Amino acid sequence: MIHHASLEIRADQLADCVAFWVVLGWNETPVAPGILDHGTWLERQGNQIHLQLVDDPSVPHGAHIALVDGNIDETVARIIDAGYELLERERYWGARRIFTRCPAGHRVELMAAPPG
């Protein structure tokens, strides 16, 4: 099981990135003592996204994090309402998939169900 993924962002992007993840259904969770000034953690259903503050973040163009979202239609509506870009993708295994990008530029895929 994967517990978390870390995404590098600049400090001035933190509030916008947290707001993005909240739209996707994630909530802030306490950061471990000793690294409180290194970023923010968000959690959903036992999994976490760690927003890591760096001066010159690495944001790969095509690489992405893929997340299963059992309420994808509701999440898509929230993404659209919040004004984030959305790209519907082909349903290779019959499940709805979309791509979006967080304010720092990281690509995020949401899937109604995993492949298989």
Image (spheres, helix red, strand yellow):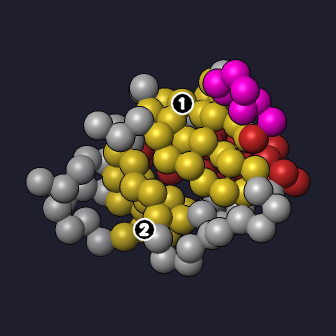
- Residue 61 inside the magenta-drawn segment: no
The residue pinned by badge 2 equals: 88
Q: Is residue 81 left or right of residue 64?
A: right
Q: Nearer the viewer, residue 72 or 16?
A: 16
Q: Position of residue 82 (x, y in %)?
A: 70, 50
Q: Nearer the viewer, residue 77 or 52?
A: 52
Q: Nearer the viewer, mark 2 or mark 1?
A: 1
Tell me the SS state at disc 1.
strand
The residue stretch that appears in magenta:
31-37
Asked if residue 74 can be seen in this view, the reply is: no
Q: Position of residue 10 (x, y in %)?
A: 80, 57
Against 45, residue 64 (above or below) is: below
Rendered residue at 61%/29% (across/down): 27
Three-letter amino acid code at the position of disc 1: Glu
Q: Is residue 29 left or right of residue 37?
A: left
Q: Position of residue 64 (x, y in %)?
A: 46, 64
Query: If you read the primary sequence from the N terminus, does the residue marked by circle 2 or circle 1 appear first?
Result: 1
- Given the current orientation, which residue lies at the most extreme front position? 34
- Residue 32 inside the magenta-drawn segment: yes
Q: Is residue 115 left or right of residue 82?
A: left
The residue pinned by badge 1 equals: 43
Rendered residue at 63%/34% (across/down): 41
Tell me the SS state at disc 2.
strand
Rendered residue at 42%/26% (across/down): 45
Against 27, residue 109 (above or below) is: below
Q: Is residue 19 left or right of residue 107?
A: right
